[in-house]
Image (cartoon, coloured by chain):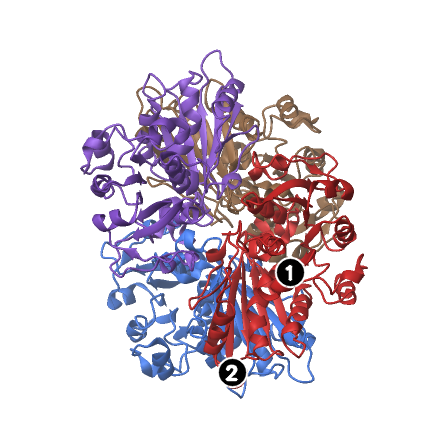
Chain colours: A blue, B red, C purple, D brown
Amino acid sequence: MIKVGIVGATGYTALELIRILLRHPTAEITALTSRDDSRPHIGSVHTSLRDRLDLHCEILDVDSLAQKVDCAFCCLPHAASAAIVGQLLDAGLKVIDFSADYRLNDATSFESIYDVRHPDADRVGNVPYGIPELFRESIAGADLVANPGCFPSSALLPLAPLLQNGLITPDDIIVDSKTGVSGAGRKANLKFHFPECNESMTAYGIGTHRHMPEIDQILTRFCQSQTQVVFTPHLTPMDRGILSTIYVKHSTGHTPDELLDCLNDFYKSEPFVRITSGIPTTKDVSFTNFCDITVKPSRDRTVIISTLDNMIKGASGAAVQNFNVMHNFDETTALL
Amino acid sequence: MIKVGIVGATGYTALELIRILLRHPTAEITALTSRDDSRPHIGSVHTSLRDRLDLHCEILDVDSLAQKVDCAFCCLPHAASAAIVGQLLDAGLKVIDFSADYRLNDATSFESIYDVRHPDADRVGNVPYGIPELFRESIAGADLVANPGCFPSSALLPLAPLLQNGLITPDDIIVDSKTGVSGAGRKANLKFHFPECNESMTAYGIGTHRHMPEIDQILTRFCQSQTQVVFTPHLTPMDRGILSTIYVKHSTGHTPDELLDCLNDFYKSEPFVRITSGIPTTKDVSFTNFCDITVKPSRDRTVIISTLDNMIKGASGAAVQNFNVMHNFDETTALL
Amino acid sequence: MIKVGIVGATGYTALELIRILLRHPTAEITALTSRDDSRPHIGSVHTSLRDRLDLHCEILDVDSLAQKVDCAFCCLPHAASAAIVGQLLDAGLKVIDFSADYRLNDATSFESIYDVRHPDADRVGNVPYGIPELFRESIAGADLVANPGCFPSSALLPLAPLLQNGLITPDDIIVDSKTGVSGAGRKANLKFHFPECNESMTAYGIGTHRHMPEIDQILTRFCQSQTQVVFTPHLTPMDRGILSTIYVKHSTGHTPDELLDCLNDFYKSEPFVRITSGIPTTKDVSFTNFCDITVKPSRDRTVIISTLDNMIKGASGAAVQNFNVMHNFDETTALL
Amino acid sequence: MIKVGIVGATGYTALELIRILLRHPTAEITALTSRDDSRPHIGSVHTSLRDRLDLHCEILDVDSLAQKVDCAFCCLPHAASAAIVGQLLDAGLKVIDFSADYRLNDATSFESIYDVRHPDADRVGNVPYGIPELFRESIAGADLVANPGCFPSSALLPLAPLLQNGLITPDDIIVDSKTGVSGAGRKANLKFHFPECNESMTAYGIGTHRHMPEIDQILTRFCQSQTQVVFTPHLTPMDRGILSTIYVKHSTGHTPDELLDCLNDFYKSEPFVRITSGIPTTKDVSFTNFCDITVKPSRDRTVIISTLDNMIKGASGAAVQNFNVMHNFDETTALL
């Protein structure tokens, strides 16, 4: 039995993580933290957890946490996370970090994109990126894993194999993503006030979203040239789900069918990636750890549709999948 | 006072049309038709119209209709519409047709795209396309206007001026559109059953949607070369609204700012097109006849966002705008 | 032309009011106020109003306002409103007040219910309650009207005639109301954060909601005995709309059909109350000033269903209806 | 390992059942049936089950089914179910029946309420009603269990203990229920077409809903006198969830607090009923087998709020709970 703690337990990713871990036969949640001095019971923070887990959220104290847990899921904002991950590792814990702090190839990129000094710059670049389908081996041996961004997961799963096999041109990729509102986190904000975003759709972060360079940096590991993905996220009036519509050009001499075959082949033994000939919906993968992908021709382009649940395969499900890989548990444990 | 009739009064576009026309000071609805033998009262067909309009839906009889109305809004399915529009015109009526029957440049295209013989092939190609902002002059003198498709409206309004001014390359345009479910019409279908499409998003008609050639055909009137727009519509869990995210390449030597300037200039006197520096939402234009447009750079691309209400500027509002132009009424009558 | 000002222009009721007044042929919006020092343009406060109304929101100054407007719609919170209404009246304006400050029969009740001193206690009890269908005559001659609460409107419209005619027992009335989230106002709050209230329903204010005594106080004007309405509001995942399910007991010797007849008779000349034999939906009245009502038997009870749009007949539409009555305009002006 | 079959596998309750059973360590789904001659694969019927369960839906053949399964979940419409349940029992299977066929106390009631001859009248009245919290003992020894209605579950769980303990008056109970649209089943119908019921709320079946007598009949087992519950269901624009607002009168000499104490005591060892002092939301119980209940005073009434997921505790979760009880498995297996 692995004792796990959740650092930053009041948000949606933590809630989802707790729901999943409560089904995990060889993990036990033994500590929760938040910045709230009043030590709130988790059942009052997340009322859906009423009577499910009898723990209070403590103020984070690394020593105390290290005595209670073997592994920490760190659900803190960027920069805040890297300020303590090193201490958790030094205390002997394994860590799965939800923030962007360890996802990029180098700290300079991070500092430029996030406009803040990286508190643990030395580790950046040496931490496995937590998509087991792409980086399983390095995750298996790691003490720290960088859990991927939700949008990047939906783009990288289809794009990485296609680039690796030279089936698409790297310099002409457009990722048009639509996400449910839970992706915005659990903090009151007029933009996410129900009457503002219900019955409405909008784009945001056009040309500037931080997941754009994250996608590029990971893709460079799968092709020679540097991609320059054009990425546009959109807010959709639903709780959860990401649908990415990805416009690519198949390389000369190749066909959209070959792209589908490549993905079918690459993911044929993967439990959580489903390549389909139909067009997937976000509801098909809602509340699951699946990523559903299809490929369709459209004139001289090829259109890839990729769907996942931003809270699960895009966050907490992926985190538990990484946890399972890191601890040599069956990778699907608690996730089906 | 112009007496108007609505042919095919049971659908959503007809409902929206009635709502608008009830506010029109110089139009009076004097006849409604449907295929229902029972002559249902419009207040029972659309319960929101209870006590608003005391008319029954009659079975269509051209002679009878011609005695009651001066102008017909034809809300029939494609091919069914063209089968009667000629008779309505012969009977001396003006007609605004909601179907695709008279939108394309030639009947051969229509027959190939819609896979049905065109019942009134000779007229195709000579009917003004009902976007007053682009074709006002020909609409003003017409007896028949082809009301545009909802997706094409959202794409053509920004693209036409940019192509006309040579600011973007015609051969690399991607239109990623998101629509509310009312666009699917008012007919029970498992795909649009609430628990199927609520909290879900999906793409459809990838590479095959009939609005794709419609967009191309109208765009050819604004540029020398034939465009090959890649168009992907998506179903979004909301009643109404279209948001089109349009990926273009600005021509060599031009900048995204120039695109915005061009649109600002082109639409500066238009009452229903609002060019904005912010990112518009579908809710901004919900229940209005506005189309809101912005332009943003994203790496080597330019991203255009265009929003409109598919039921109003995308259908019934545009129809009344055309009606106003055809009758020399103030174009905004009943639409603000 | 009546010049109107809106005091407190940044909320949803003000937005709705502006939308309606922009259609009003004999009202012109000439001033807006908010507490924001930066004097924001209304088109940036409410982006849907972009290019519709070229006014900035000024800090309230009574003298300045009095020079610009003949009539003020006051959309301030309770107590804040009564602190300035007197000054507006003294400056010679007519005022329609959206707050609860002048709705109750006496200031003591107000202070007990709202737990704050009433800043203008003397006027309380002498201000007409703004439901024209019930109090048209006193509204017509008034300089100040208390615009009613949204829930009370939905309950009072059916209950007042039935009590007045002795058709139901006053001491056994249950009002179970469901409202869209716009009723909560336009202020970020975790409770109304999209992922918290979407796909969820909850009750609130059980036994304590301030609209409960408001309903009772107005009902006492229609029957001898004091009612003790049991009122429970519920939050529903939709933007707008109130549906009240009202459980009453018909008086001995009477039948549910007689209740329906009574309402039909009472409202037969009213333009905005529609008595129906079918069961109304909130969508039937969405974006309208209608209140739809039906009566159905259920065992030994009678069930009344009443629907209205909380933002229109429940707030801003009612306000314009009152404005029309106060100025002797056709009562339906700008409201159909 | 118990081999289970699902008769009528194409609806929402079957989908939910499959999702739950796929997590059940001692149940294996070995057969599915539908009326579709084409033997569709379950992954095409429910695309979310893609790659989860490799079974085709067969036309029901009792002999063939009996060879493949030990226990059948019967998800057929009323009357259709009772036409085959007897055969399934005769073939030695255990059966959990989702229909109303075996829920009532006698076949005469059934025939009067459902207006159809009961095909298996003799069994009616001898089948345990499948709420384990109330009838665990009889369920444990049964071969056939009548899975309860979703609305009745939400009403009976709080009302049964209170009536049994004489804390409320039996002749004055009002149940005002709100349900998500999945309760309407998975069949296209204009009433449940997304643009009809989204952003709308309505009541239905006022005074006539079939769950009204079901509630009464079960309640008679907990009190001497016959209840006459007034029950009104409402359709709410969300996928799933039932919230019942129940208006009761506490018996003379008792208080609302005593009601809460009674429920706390009655359910203190139950894993799936959570008595709370806060007001529960449907989201708290969404995708879970919990029923959350609170009690609040409101003037001379007591208001009970009860929430559950209509697809889980209101249908398929309850069915698996019954399955666990019938097979002497831990009652929470696959349900937490």
Q: How far separated are the C-alphas under marks 1 and 2?
A: 47 Å
- Nearer the observer, D238 or C209: C209
Is A335 on the left or on the right of C221, as rendered? right
Q: Is residue A292 visible?
A: no
- The image shows a total of numbered marks equal to 2
Q: Residue at x 38, y 37 (%)?
A: C150
* Both marks 1 and 2 on one chain: no
Q: Residues within 10 Å of mark 2 (few under 14, many from 20)?
A: many
Residue C88 image point, x, y percent:
24, 42
Figure quadrant of residue C38: bottom left
Coordinates of residue D244 in the picture (x, y in percent): 45, 35
**To which chain does the residue with label 1 belong?**
B
Q: Amino acid at mark 1?
A: Ile
Residue B327 seen in the figure: yes
- Chain that bears disc 2: A
Indicate left or right for B3 with A238 as reference. right
Residue B139 badge: 1
Is residue B249 shown above or below A43? below
Would residue D266 appear left or right of B195 to someone viewing this image? left
Q: Is label 1 in a helix, a strand or a loop?
A: helix
Q: Nearer the viewer, residue C31 or D304?
A: C31
User: Which is closer to the viewer, label 1 or label 2?
Assistant: 1
**Residue A207 higher or lower than D266, as above or below:** below
Q: Nearer the viewer, residue B211 or D159?
A: B211
Q: Position of residue D328 (x, y in %)?
A: 53, 42
Residue that carries the numbered disc 2 in the rendered image = A227
Local SS, label 2: loop
Image x and y of residue B279, in percent: 44, 66
Instruction: Mark 1 and mark 2 in contact? Answer it, CB < 8 Å.
Output: no
In the rendered image of this protein, does residue D303 appear above or below residue A99?
A: above
Label 2 is placed on what type of residue? Thr
User: Would you call the spot at circle 1 few (<14 residues within 10 Å), some (14-19), or many (20 or more)?
Assistant: many
